[in-house]
Amino acid sequence: MCGIVGALLERGHVLRGMIEGLRVLEYRGYDSAGVAVATEDGLVVEKRAGRLEVLERALEESAFPDGRAGIGHTRWATHGPPTDANAHPHVAADGHVAVVHNGILENYLELREELAGAGVEFRSDTDTEVLAHLVSRELAAGGSLADALRRALARVRGYYAVAVLKDDGAPEVCCAREGPPLCVGLAREGTWIGSDVLAIVPHTREVVFLEDGDVAELSTRGVVVRGRDGAVVERAPQRVDWDAADAGKGTWAHHMLKEIHEQPDVLARTAFHRLDEARGDVRFDEAGWSDADLAGVERVQVVACGTALHAGHVLRYLVEGLARVPVDVDFASEFRYRAPVLAPGTLALAISQSGETADTLAALRLAKELGARAACICNVAGSTMVRESDAALMTQAGPEIGVASTKAFTAQVVAAYLLAVRLGRARGTLDEARGRELLRELRLLRPSLERLLSSESVARVRAVAARHKGVKGFLFLGRGVNFPIALEGALKLKEISYMHAEGYAAGEMKHGPIAMIEEWMSSVVITGAGAMAEKVRSNIEQIMARGGPVIAVGADEASLALADERIDVPASSEWLSPILNVIPLQLLSYEIARLRGCDIDKPRNLAKSVTVE
Ligand code: AGP
């Protein structure tokens, strides 16, 4: 939702490092940005609505001073429009305390009234400004900045990752976490704060992941963390292997395009080291997936959001089809509020790229309360979801910066396929020979992925995009294991081109959507395999008979030949076809958004990780 950076250094200056950190975090929120630095002449703040480059220009124009302590922020507005005044940092009335915050302070209005009644004048519409004044008033009551922050937070209800800078005398920096992620990097020159590790790894790989309730007091040689009760808690630093360069887009036009093209490598990194072809089985290095662990799994309950939920729908087809274990899939935001009933032996499986999505975390916690074992498929080591799960199946997609998830999605589907094989082998519903066949088919997938990303394949999709970029809207249709791919294709197009697009089970066409068919409503139909192929062909005929243009995507020649437009996908096993079929849909959404001049990596109103409700 928002990006937070900060630092307290022994020597040297923080500004450049903070700006670079905000640039890396900009994918988390980008409607305004700001920094505060402690200098000999006191606290200096610069903040601007708009993208980070607007702030950078302001810093240059004002010859902004530098210092060895500072905090910074990129915002995704929750309270108050994106204006200079509403941008973070927010400064207390005395001018000595600055605060940046990610989250929501649910009782900020009552606190605001109380403070206004005590004479505090507010300069923004935000909830965060309340915290700046509370910390300042608690400081006046005595104690350290960390004590003041803890006392101020005791007044607050809500979710927050917060960093505070104080400047009178020797500068001090503290931070705290309740919900949204926050980590602390232990570098040679001092200590850094970041909403995620990408902002920290340019300075150090030794990272402390704060837990909910932690208040951390930075020093130039490390950090002291105290828990909810104020007692010091041990938070051992973890070594992080992500590279800041991985988060760059190099010569690619957009992060999303780079990440689409990384998918063959992501498949290999996520899957190939886990394949035990001799035994037709999968080896999970992570704990919690052994035969013994899986023997008791009677049912799987998937909870996720957005694209990750679509991977969960694919997982259901794979696990039920290959391992014969029943699977339920639910929106995390619905599951957490619908008073669910979980049968004994249920494995709750959260799927999340970031491992920080508030609804998914809440749903997983509820499932644990209801007696389920908790597991996750996740892409970020050290994330909250990984730390709160009994077992974590890690995808190896690397940092995904584009707000529209692509490589993380295919990595999640690959992980689902591996889990289906592991579950089937552990429970005896898959024999060794069949296991070996499934693993061989997975290993053969990479060249097919590379073909779909070749320049001629991309050119074909680009031509289709050019012909359909101005239509009224899109219907995406699929059947069976490719029905979730129809949902995913529609979401990709919606979120980066802002066009109306709807994903539907192709068999549902005649129950409503067919009424929408007209010349200006394009239908993207994912062709089927086996028995489904014939049924999808008749869907295509029904649409074309009513004058609707059809773009067929897949490997079924009869369907491809029938449609107005065709995007060929290499043949594969039906179970693996979703990983291939989604690639042209990712490229189609990218090309249409590009032709429509949309901001592909930072689509309006969206953020990469939705860490609040
Ligand atoms: C995907 O393109 C979207 N950006 C969004 O739906 C995303 O998948 C969803 O917010 C879940 O995020 P997570 O995987 O980090 O939990």
Image (spheres, rainbow, N blue to C red):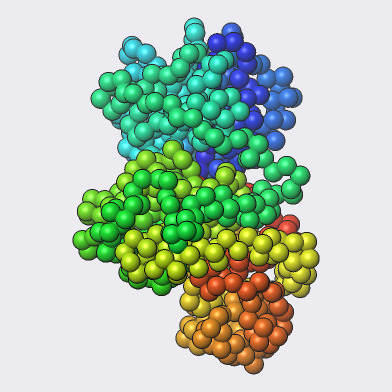
Location of residue 309 with respect to 382 vertically, above or below: below
Name the residue rendered at 62%, 90% in the picture: 541
Q: Which residue lies most toward the bottom here?
A: 545
Left or right, residue 139 beside residue 559: left
Any part of residue 249 in sight: yes
Left or right, residue 593 beside residue 309: right
Location of residue 556 with respect to 466 vertically, above or below: below
Residue 451, horizontal then vertical, whole percent: 71, 64
State the count of labels: 0
Residue 439, horizontal then vertical, whole percent: 51, 63
Considering depth in this image, is 589 or 384 the residue closer to the camera? 384
Any part of residue 308 in sight: no
**Which image quadrant is residue 338 in?**
bottom left
Considering depth in this image, is 527 or 428 the residue closer to the camera? 428
Residue 99, horizontal then vertical, whole percent: 48, 26
Name the residue rendered at 64%, 29% in the picture: 19
